[in-house]
């Protein structure tokens, strides 16, 4: 409509929480494009997406949890457990593939329900709960797998690693699934009452309860859905690695998922953040890893850089939180 | 008890007997009684820590008393959450304002009672009717005479007074039986205080009773039909602006020496 409308829109765009992360992503990409010719290529972008896929899906669950002012340290190990259950049941126990996959996903959902139950029922801090389940899931992964790697997996378990081609560039179905999951999470958070209750609960649990929101149910739903995303990530992980590996996906994934959420502008204090920001955050992590590898920087330095990035992002968060009270 | 009661309807709409609430060693409520009658503004006064907020939290389902009973329209009730009280038509503005700063004004007004789009978009996809809620929120604000710049503004960006306006408006908009306000003008300037007071009057004109907690004696005496005085977790007296002066009410509230209190009460006659 009028110029005020345009101005309002312009203001919205500038102050939108995803703008900062987006600029950071663009700058990172410009940097690596200048450093090496091998970066800015369709095939390389496709590779980045594949590398981002697992952490990207885990980070959806992590975003939900962090939006409620919680944190989940167990994401990677719960996913690893789900993956071992899916593959072991199918290969070693002769369970048909669909029930094997379902049981793997259900295990991860079960961990989510457990987290939610402890957060709401016993009112323990999520940090401690998930530190505990991190260890439990880690132990179970190795006990159940007997430290064996499972190969010769049924086709359906490998599905998300299959590729299709768009004008000569290969993409995996897993990447598509990740994008669909982001769209679903965006919809839930922005277009439904549930999403508003998640934000309100994260911002101030007691205030949300006083306005008549069933905060326990909100928290339980958040942790359960988070568990579901870890289960889906487990299936994606099999597609990516083509095996059931008890050592795949552990603490790196935990930290990377948190890094993605924080880089994406979601506040660790809860109540503020977006899932689109998280996708951008996951891409930043992926681009950094990919770019540093391309220019021949050793993996250890990648950890160094992501560590510094996280602390920077958290500092910005802290600063904004102080300013806004 | 010989507290003054409105002649018209002797049945209290909400009533409590012997409420007790302890926090460890602290006894926040120590056998408090309470009643409010249809259509009246009941002020609750008392010193800091007298138990006013604890009392209304028990009445609004925000906490469960350890002992005592509450009845609504003559029936025993047991609110297990603020939601239960809301379903019964009781809306509350809490002292530590319950708003969601990240959400806009309309979303705050509809928080916990969002409306969805009609048809399958709403029933299947659970899509919010954002435009409808904004329209309705704007209508309610106009009806209550509250001016807001933009219904789409995040509540976190509003001033303290405006935030309070949103909380009060939400309560006034949804209440069907009773509005409870815990120090709704505490953080407000003169102009905003005036607006909230007008709002309280307008709520009464709608026929809804109001419980108003306030430390502001002139406003209490201007607005209230009856004044419930709390001290050390109990109701010590109920007075009216007609029968008592402000200094007398304050004397009862602060527990002036027993003899002084007796004098005051003997003259006016409304001890418990
Ligand atoms: N959640 C709680 N935990 C521990 N003690 C509490 C809690 N809530 C209230 N109290 C105590 O109970 C007593 C009554 O508190 P309450 O908030 O009801 O007082 P009030 O009359 O509303 O005071 P004010 O005028 O300052 O708002 C106080 O001594 C307070 O410290
Ligand atoms: Mg109080």
Image: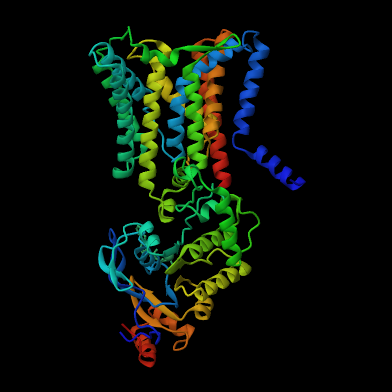
Residue A3, image quadrant: top right
- Residue A250 seen by the camera: no
Q: Residue at x 55, y 22 (%)?
A: A283
Count of residue discs = 0
In the displayed orientation, state which residue is furthest to the front: B119
Ligand 1 image position (quadrant): bottom left
Q: Find residue B172 and report its horizontal and vertical position in percent.
A: 50, 65
Residue A48, image quadrant: top right
Q: Residue at x 40, y 52 (%)?
A: A209
A210 sits left or right of B223 in the view: left
In the displayed orientation, state which residue is furthest to the right: A3
- Residue A161 seen by the camera: yes
In the displayed orientation, state which residue is furthest to the left: A93
| Residue B107 versus residue A64 in the image, above or below | below
Give the quarter of the figure containing the C terminus of chain B.
bottom left
Q: Find residue A312 and report its horizontal and vertical position in percent.
A: 56, 30
| Residue B78 versus residue A270 in the image, above or below | below
Give the quarter of the figure containing the N terminus of chain B.
bottom left
Q: Find residue A184 and report its horizontal and vertical position in percent.
A: 48, 33
A217 sits left or right of B118 in the view: left
**Which of these two is toward me, B247 or B182?**
B182
Q: Residue at x 49, y 39 (%)?
A: A189
**Which of these two is toward me, B215 or A117?**
A117
Q: Find residue A224 and report its horizontal and vertical position in percent.
A: 36, 35
Colouring scheme, one of rainbow, by chain, secondary structure, one colour: rainbow
Q: Residue at x 33, y 38 (%)?
A: A116
């Amino acid at each position: 409509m009028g110029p005020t409308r345009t101005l309002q829109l312009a203001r919205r765009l500038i102050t939108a929480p995803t703008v900062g992360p987006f600029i950071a992503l663009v700058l990172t990409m410009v940097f690596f494009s200048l450093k090496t010719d091998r970066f800015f290529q369709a095939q390389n972008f496709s590779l980045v997406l594949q590398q981002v896929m697992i952490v990207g899906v885990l980070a959806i669950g992590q975003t939900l949890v962090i939006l409620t002012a919680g944190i989940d340290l167990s994401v990677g190990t719960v996913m690893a457990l789900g993956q071992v259950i899916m593959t072991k049941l199918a290969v070693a126990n002769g369970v048909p593939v669909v029930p094997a996959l379902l049981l793997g996903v259900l295990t991860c959902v079960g961990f989510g329900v457990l987290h939610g139950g402890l957060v709401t029922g016993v009112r323990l801090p999520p940090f401690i709960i998930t530190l505990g389940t991190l260890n439990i899931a880690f132990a179970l992964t190795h006990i159940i797998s007997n430290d064996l790697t499972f190969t010769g997996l049924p086709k359906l378990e490998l599905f998300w690693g299959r590729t299709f081609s768009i004008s000569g560039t290969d993409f995996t179905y897993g990447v598509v699934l990740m994008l669909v999951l982001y769209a679903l999470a965006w919809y839930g958070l922005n277009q439904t009452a549930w999403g508003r209750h998640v934000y309100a609960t994260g911002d101030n649990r007691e205030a949300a309860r006083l306005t008549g929101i069933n905060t326990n149910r909100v928290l339980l739903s958040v942790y359960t859905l988070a568990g579901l995303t870890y289960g889906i990530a487990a299936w994606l992980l099999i597609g990516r690695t083509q095996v059931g590996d008890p050592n795949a996906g552990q603490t790196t994934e935990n930290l990377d998922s948190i890094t993605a959420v924080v880089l994406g502008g979601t506040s660790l204090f809860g109540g503020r953040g977006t899932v689109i920001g998280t996708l951008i955050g996951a891409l930043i992590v992926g681009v950094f890893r990919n770019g540093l590898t391309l220019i021949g920087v050793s993996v250890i330095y990648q950890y160094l850089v992501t560590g510094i990035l996280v602390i920077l992002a958290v500092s910005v968060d802290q600063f904004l939180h102080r300013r806004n009270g | 008890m010989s507290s003054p009661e409105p002649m018209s309807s002797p049945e209290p709409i909400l009533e409590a007997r012997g409420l007790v609430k302890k926090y460890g060693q602290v006894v926040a409520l120590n056998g408090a009684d309470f009643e409010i009658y249809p259509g009246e503004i009941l002020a609750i006064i008392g010193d800091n820590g007298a138990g006013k907020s604890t009392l209304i939290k028990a009445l609004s389902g925000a906490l469960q008393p350890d002992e005592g009973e509450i009845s609504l329209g003559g029936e025993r009730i047991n609110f297990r959450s603020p939601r239960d009280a809301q379903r019964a038509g009781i809306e509350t503005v809490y002292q530590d304002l319950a708003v969601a700063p990240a959400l806009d004004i309309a979303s705050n007004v509809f928080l916990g009672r969002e409306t969805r789009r009609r048809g399958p978009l709403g029933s299947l996809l659970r899509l919010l009717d954002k435009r409808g809620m904004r329209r309705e929120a704007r209508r309610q604000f106009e009806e209550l005479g509250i001016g807001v710049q933009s219904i789409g503004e995040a509540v976190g960006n509003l001033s303290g007074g405006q935030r309070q306006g949103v909380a009060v408006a939400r309560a006034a908009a949804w209440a069907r039986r009773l509005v409870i306000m815990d120090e709704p003008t505490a953080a407000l300037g003169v102009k905003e205080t005036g607006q909230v007071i007008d709002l309280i009057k307008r709520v009464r004109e709608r026929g809804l009773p109001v419980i108003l907690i306030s430390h502001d004696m002139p406003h209490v005496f201007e607005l209230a039909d009856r004044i419930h005085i709390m001290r050390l977790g109990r109701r010590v007296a109920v007075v009216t602006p007609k029968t008592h002066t402000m200094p007398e009410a304050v004397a009862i509230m602060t527990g002036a020496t027993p003899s002084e209190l007796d004098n005051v009460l003997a003259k006016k006659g409304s001890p418990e």
